Image: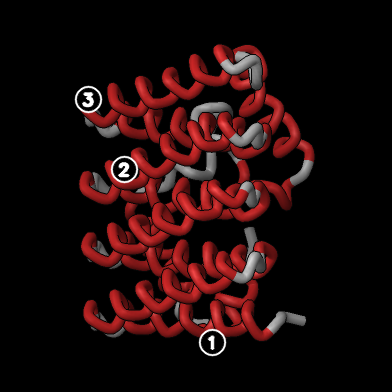
Amino acid sequence: MFSLNEQKAIELGESGERAIREKNEYDALQYAEYLREFGQELLEGNLEKDLKRVAISLRNIGNKAIQKKIENVASTALSDLNSLSETALDKGFSNAMWSFSKAVQEIGKGAVQFQMLESAKIALDTLKMIGMGAVEKKMEVVTLWTTMSIEEMAYLANRQQLEDLTKDAKEAREEIIEYSEASGFVTREQIEKYPQLIAQTVSQFSELQNLQPAGYAAKPNEEFTEEEFFEEEEEGEEQEPETEAAKKEM
């Protein structure tokens, strides 16, 4: 059973997705902005638990915008996640930060694979900010997840022959690792082993396939073709939007 705050976040996200399907960019941008404002209200009220649904809804809007190749909406969703992440870091909300990191990761990887460079750059900058902040706030899981996410972006950018983005991602990851080690926090060895441990776990539990790191298996699920990406979208649109959004968990 969702709380009223969670339900509101779901409804705003569904409305934003619907606007994208209808190619109504103005309304999609408005709903992303409503979600940012609502997320800020939750942060001010220290309602960390409900922020997860805001992250999911912004992620869904961003992913749908990537599918429809509406970069302005995708970039806006990422910028909103960046803004909320900064405040959540200041408050030390580690659970919310993991949700924000995963949301940015998903939109960012889609942006890389469809070579939407503005959105990819915002995603990378946001992940770097989250990673550096996670080290400072001693958020171990967020640090590990975020460095893995940046490594995935570097891997996918290299596959797309995006040399500048690949270089920037590798440098961002290295900067976080060096800062972590200098702070006596998570070691390089832990960071490098983390995605391998996830890949091993995923191979044993099929329901965790959505966590499969790119580059650590024969065919990681993040490496989809454009045809597969749009086929998945069409299948999803056959469902009622409310049912689809309510099922999307992080």
Q: Nearer the viewer, residue 167 or 202?
A: 167
- For mark 3, what is the residue? 163
Q: Mark 3: which secondary structure?
A: helix
| Distance of label 3 from label 1 (alpha carbons) | 41 Å
Q: Which of 84 and 76 is in front in this view?
A: 84
Q: Can you tell which mark lies on residue 240?
A: 1
Q: Can residue 248 be seen in this view?
A: no
Which residue is pictured at 64% across the width and 72% down the height? 247
Image side of residue 8 versus residue 234, left or right: right
Q: Which amino acid does label 1 sit on?
A: Glu
Return the x and y of residue 180 as percentages of the image width and height.
56, 20
Residue type (three-letter) at the residue carrying disc 2:
Val
Query: What's the mark number on residue 9?
Result: none
Residue under the image location 55 percent in, 79 percent down: 10
* In front of the other: 177 or 225: 177
Q: Left or right? Give the position of 67 relative to 11.
A: left
Residues at badges 3 and 1 in contact (C-beta under 8 Å)? no
